[in-house]
Amino acid sequence: MSNAHKPVPVRTLEEKSSKADRWMARRLMDFIGWPPVQLVLWDGSRYAREDADVVAAIIVRDRGALRRLVTNPEFEFGEMYSCGRIEVDGDLAECLVCVYRALRAAGQVGGLRKRLLHALAKHPHNDEARARENIHHHYDIGNDFYRLWLDEQLVYTCAYFPAPDMTLEQAQIAKMAYVCRKLRLEPGQRVVEAGCGWGALALYMARQHGVTVKAYNISREQIAFARQRARREGLDDRVEFIEDDGRNIEGEFDVFVSVGMLEHIGVDSYPALASVIDRVLSDRGRGLIHSIGRDRPGPLNSWIQRRIFPGAYPPSISEMMTLFEPNGLSVLDIENLRLHYARTLQHWLQRYDANGDRVARMFDDTFRRLWRLYLAGSVAAFSTGTLQLFQVVFNRSGNNDVPWTRDYLYREPLPDQSPAS
């Protein structure tokens, strides 16, 4: 969309904008750094940089929405978009990418104000009861909903695209193979997985590498699905799905793996998790933790925290290190896969949009818009570096059973036999 783009249709809901409205519109654009995005008020008033080829228009439908947006842009944009009082004409994800980049340039991302707010804010404290409530809020809203836009195996974490033109299904299998290569799994090893989703990785490890797996999860719907799939595939003698918090893991294991759980427990729970890893990992054990993160400590977007992921906190690398340093664990490798997550999310958003009418029928249109904004905003966050995706490999300190080079990571994976679930 350029400056010459056809006028955006605006439904007039009230009288012409006032001088105060126009002042608020300009202050809002000042705050977000005047990105190549046009702000349009309910009466057709438009605000944009004169030298910019705008990529999208943000349409504010009423004065109340503008006031709320100016008061708390981070939170109220999501609220107003979800209920239809703000519209976006153009590509929503690209619009948000432009806004995020302009915010960074204007010093609003990671700036002094953000650091002060983070210092004053309380970290999420997710004891077992609160963790169950949070997971139920996000993951137990129905497997049929997730089937609409995830891959065939319902893998709800960052995929891995060694070839950019891979399908989502291929890239999720490639991710599981990549994790297994990093862990250097061998037949007969005992693996524990903390936070197993719908069970795809646990089943893959048992099927492809001959290991036994205990997989912990507190989502009732996910565990029921995973157990049913294990029975159907004849793997229930090698994979045990346990409905319990990962902080209650018992036993001794050769390998610890957690993909997509750490960001849900909060840094206050890291000492408990570190103690679990130390308690259950064998003398020659190793592990991998895969987590959304940040370049520096900072809170999750307040709207995402409230509406999508209550209790979530994406850690920085320095915060993640508190899992390893107190108990003599050595970090062997850290990789950042954020652009792979951006591509994963693009696939999810495309599938979600293709099924938007079905989502609205399952829930309502507010829910449809809410989750659409979450997915598009996540594309923007990983595309611009607002969020990161870390994979950290570790083992016991002093254990010399480590690869001499990284060649083993990039060997061609074995052909996968994973059935569609």
Image (cartoon, rainbow, N blue to C red):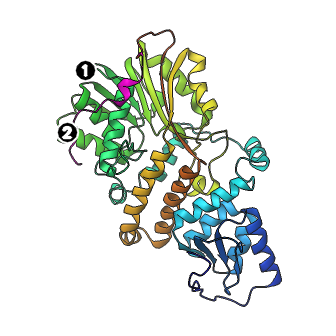
* Near-viewer residue (378 or 232): 378
Q: State the predominant SS element of the stretch in magenta.
A: loop
At numbered mark 2, what does the secondary structure look like: helix, strand or loop? loop
Q: Are marks 1 and 2 in contact (CB under 8 Å)?
A: no
Instruction: Please state the extent of the stretch shown in magenta in the rendering.
Output: 404-421
Q: Position of residue 150 (x, y in %)?
A: 35, 54
Question: How many numbered badges does the structure rendering display?
Answer: 2
* Near-viewer residue (385 or 294): 385
Q: Position of residue 412 (x, y in %)?
A: 28, 32
Mark 1 or mark 2, which has the lower sequence index?
A: 1
Residue at screen point 34% across, 42% down:
223
Amino acid beneath label 1: Pro
User: Residue 238: which quarter of the image?
Assistant: top left
Residue at screen point 31% across, 52% down:
167
- Neighbor class of circle 2 (other Cα within 10 Å; few <14, some 14-19, many 20+) is few
Q: Which residue is mark 1?
A: 187
Q: Mark number for residue 368? A: none
* Near-viewer residue (45 or 284): 45
> Going by the image, does 275 lie left or right of 111?
left
Q: Quadrant of the N terminus?
A: bottom right
Please, is residue 114 above or below residue 274 in the view?
below
- Cα distance, mark 1 to mark 2? 17 Å
Q: Is residue 67 magenta?
A: no
Most extreme residue toward the front is 51
Amino acid beneath label 2: Gln
Res. 398 visible in picture: yes
> Going by the image, does 141 lie left or right of 306?
left
- Neighbor class of circle 1 (other Cα within 10 Å; few <14, some 14-19, many 20+) is few
